[in-house]
Structures are given as C-alpha cells and as structure tokens.
Amino acid sequence: MNTARRSRRLAATLLTAALAAGGLTVAAAPAAHAAASDLVAKLPISSFSALAVDSAHQRVYVADSNMGSYTNTGLIAVYDFSGERVTTLSTQRHVSGLALNADGSVLYVGGREGILRYDTATYTSLSAGTAGTDTCGRSLAFAGGRAYHTTPYANYTSECDATLTYLDNHQTDNTWQRTGWQDHGKLQLEAGPGDRLMMGQPLNAKAADPFLAVFDASGTTLVRTAGRRFADADGKGAQNLKDMAFSADGSKVAVADATAGTRLLNTADLSDAETGYPALPSGASASAVAFGGDGKYLARGASASGATPDLLLSPADPADTTAPLEFVFEGSLDGDRVAPRGLEWSADGSRLFAVTTNTAGNQYWLHIVQPPAVQYDSRFTGGLTHSRATAGEPLAVRGKLEFDGPAPAEPLKVTATRTDANGTHELGTATVKADGTFTVLDEPDLVGDATYTVSFLGDLTHRPATDVTHTVSVGKAASSIALTAPAEASMSTGVRITGTFAAQGKALPERAVLKVERADRLGTGTLSSVTVAADGTFTIDDLPRTRRETTYTVSWPGDDLHEGSTASATVRVTR
C-alpha cells in the first residue's frame, strides 16, 4: 500500500485577483486548507464495476467485472479501513454489482447466472440465488429488506449500453422475481433511508431523454413515488447520469451528471432544490457523488486533467459556503480521475472511500480519505484600520482574524469587497499571517465614503467568521505647482518663468491647463493660460507693463479626483 502525500494532491492553483484601477494583485488561496489523511492502495483489478462499504465490520469491497470474455473469472478485493487487503474473493465468471443487507452480515454479488451471497464475518459463500442471465453487468441495491438487481442481456458487449434491462428482486427462497419495471441501457440502482430505492438511466442510443425515479420499497410491490426526465421542449438538458446518491436523511438526491455537473433534487418529487451546489471547476466532468453517513459532507468525484481537482469535499448543506477540500489525482501513484460510481462513505462519515482510475481505464486505486472531524470557531478582532485614503492611490486596510483549534496546514485567506457610490467591487483575497493579521490592498477611484467588508468563509476545519466592515472617507489627491522665476527683469527683455506641475493619485485624463495672473501697481489681470507638457513642465513668457514689483500667480482648479493648487513668484521689474 502506498501512502500518498497530501501536499502533492491538494489543488494548489493560485488565482490572481486584479484590484481596482491600480493593477495591484494578491494571490488567491487554494480552495481548502484543512488537513485530511489520504491513504492509497493499488487495486489488483483491471476493470471496476462496484464499491460497497461494510461499516459494521470495517471492510471495503471492490468488484472487478472482467467481462472481456464469457469465460473470465471476476473477483472482489476486500480491504480494511486502513487500506490493508484482507482477502480476495474469486467468483464465477464475471462479477458486477455489490450490495450489503441492512446489518452488513451478508454481501450480495451480481454474477452472470445468479446472485451470489457471502458471509461478511467469515467470507464463506452462502447459498446463491438464481437470476436472469446477465451479459453486460448488473447493478444491485438492498432496500425494504430485500436485494434488487438489474438484468441486462445482449448477444454482444457492444450492444450493452442500449440493451433492454429489467429490474428484478431477490426472494427469500433465493429465487428472483420481475418487478415489471424495465427500460433500455445499463440501469443503475441506489438504496436510501426510509426503504427508498432509486433507479437512474444513463444516456444511450435508445434513451435521448433518460429518466430518474424513486420508489417506495417497503412493501412487496415497488411503488414509484417520483419520476423525472430533464430535457426541455427542444431536447436540451437531458441528464448524462454517472452516479446518484440520497442525502443522509433521505430528503434530497444528488446526481453526478457528466453534462450538467451536480444536480440537487428534492426526493419527494425530484424537483430542483431551492439551493444547489456550486459548479465543478472548469474542465471537470462529474463522475461520482456520495453523502457522508453523518450528514456533514458531500463528496463529488470528477474526471479532470492537469491541476483541475478530481475530488471535492464540501458541506452537505448547499447553503454553507465553506470552501471545499480539493484533491488532484496524478498518474501512477494516484490514478488520474474518480471512476464512475467510485465513491462511498463509512456510516459515521469518518472515512470516504474513492476508487480512481488512469486515463486508459485499466488500472485502479483505492483512496481512504479522513476529513477533519471537528470544526473550530473563528472571529475578526479589533475591527479594521486603514492608511490615508486618497482617490487613485494605494490604500491598505488592516485587520486580525483569530481562530480556535490547531493551526491550518496552509495559510488562511480572507476575501474583501469595497462598496461605494458606483456599487460593490470584489477585491480578491489576502493572506492571513501566522499572528492572524492581514492587509487588504486597494486603490479607490471615487471620492466619498467607501465601505470595506472583509469575510472569512471558513474551511473544513474552521467555521466562517462574522463579516467585519469599515467605512473610509476617500479624499481627493493632492496637486502641486512649483515656479522658478528671476529676481529681477527689465521691461524691454521681458520675464520668463519656468515651472513644474504634479498631480498625485490617478493620472489626469488630459494635460492640465494652468491659469496665470499678473499683479502690479496698475492692478491685476489675467494672462494667457499655459498647458503643461507631458513631463509636467511649463514656461510663462511676459512683457511687464510697468516698473517695480510684479507678482505672477499660477493656479489649477482641480477636478473630481484632485485638489487644486496655486503658486506665486514676485519679480522686480526695471526699465
């Protein structure tokens, strides 16, 4: 068994958030920072058909269908919860679906000609049950006190994806009985709380708009309580089913849809839940889904390449925006993606079992993930402070985040927004230092009040903190004028004054035009305006009209983002 390193697998792609108007950037966080152990065992199988978890005996069963030939022998690899292989069960011909009875004492296995049964304490074979011949692979589920299985049949394996499949049940006398429900394709089964049974139809050539259905399995006859197809009037939106799961309380259904991502539905009528889950990362196609037995977490598996996450662990409550824990599986130590229907939890939610496969689909790995069992509180303390707030100039908003429990494996991140008269602006994220302090960088571009809101959305170890806000009065940026003038000049040669103009903050949309006034013993008058050059310099030439002291005043009135400025120079004028 190989134990994989978490640091290599956790998604570590850094996003860059451009801050308003100034090109400032901060690095965004990986999606999660909580520690989680991940043990990995290489599976002795070349194909995968089913995964079952026996929490009563702490065993994990992985089935190898091995259906390449009629004479192939299937196998079931048995592992304990620490990833050690306990035994291997060889079966007749190929083996497909797996299901455990209510107390975990009997394992039901889908064989070619029947339903096999094993004692989960001793792994001894029990009396087998008859079933219709299966040439494509069965799906099994135990609901309402009995095992249900699908029975597809095709002359050639190339016909399996669209062949007619029947839903049958296993009788107490080890015979089987048709339920009367049937349709085309490799129908999939899932059991849920309250004697519920779900059946889903994968997309296939004979089912352009596949169905999802929920049954009441408490009686001797299956009663459908909800059914749905998803395509609209134009045929768009049909589901591409890869996996499905009931929530811990049975009130919701999650569907791994390779086209739509994760669908969250109300079990009662399969309508869309009011609040759904966020989309999978770009480039990830849904392949598996499973709710934790304790109702805390949802696991979503995907087929993705590169640094795109293949597995996300999120709060089961879709209204909880805590960032997910993300895993990226890479190559020969991990597999490359989560296999369809390759996720199951232990009953207490303490472990997630994930089957991954390589790109070719001929090698498989078993991952045993232990998410953090405890969440700790976090809080902002001391409010927020800020440096001088000037439009168009960098502004630092500082604060402190405190959190209980152990230090996170990766630095925490806070997110920030600025709300002003032009609306709310996303400012990206800022790293929380080891002492809890953080600095949000911004460049406000509007004079007036701006309210900064800093949030910590939590992770799988820490609960979200209550947002903290801080209102800042953003002022105009300063401007300045500097003059260089001669101490004395004559009326005949004239006066030349040079100067520089500077405006801080946001660059002016056009070159500044300066007003020039001359005051002498004859009065005050306005001279021709002067336009500042691109380098901020300007020159004033004047022929004085009288002797003695003459004062030149140069001014700029300012604009929406800049204060005005004035400068004066006095020259003694001679003949």
Image (spheres, grey):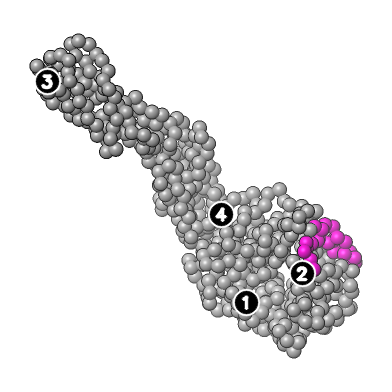
Single out the residue that lies furthest toward the top.
522
Residue found at x 17% / y 27%: 496
- Amino acid type of the residue that numbered disc 4 sits on in the rendered structure: Ala
Q: Where is residue 69 in the image (x, y as percent from the top left)?
A: 73, 86
Disc 3 residue crowd, few under 14, some 14–19, many 20+, Cα 10 Å = few
**Mark 2 = which residue?**
205
Task: Looking at the image, tell me whether mark 4 or mark 1 is earlier in sequence order.
Answer: 4
Residue 201 got which mark?
none
Question: Does 547 appear above or below 530?
Answer: above
**Mark 1 = which residue?**
361
Q: Position of residue 99 (x, y in %)?
A: 75, 73
Please tell me whether mark 2 sits on a helix, a strand or a loop.
loop
Task: Looking at the image, tell me whether mark 4 or mark 3 is earlier in sequence order.
Answer: 4
- Asked if one can make out residue 178 in the rendered structure from this viewpoint, the answer is yes
The span from disc 4 to disc 1 (Cα, nearest Å) is 30 Å
**Which residue is more in the foreground, 309 or 250?**
309
Task: Looking at the image, tell me whether mark 3 or mark 1 is earlier in sequence order.
Answer: 1
Question: Does 573 appear above or below 435?
Answer: above
- Amino acid type of the residue that numbered disc 2 sits on in the rendered structure: Ala
**Magenta run includes residue 207:** yes
**Magenta run includes residue 56:** no
Question: Does 528 appear above or below 142?
Answer: above
Residue 492 got which mark?
3
Between marks 2 and 4 in the image, the one whose residue lies nearer the viewer? 2
Q: In which quarter of the image is the C terminus?
A: top left
Please tell me whether mark 3 sits on a helix, a strand or a loop.
loop
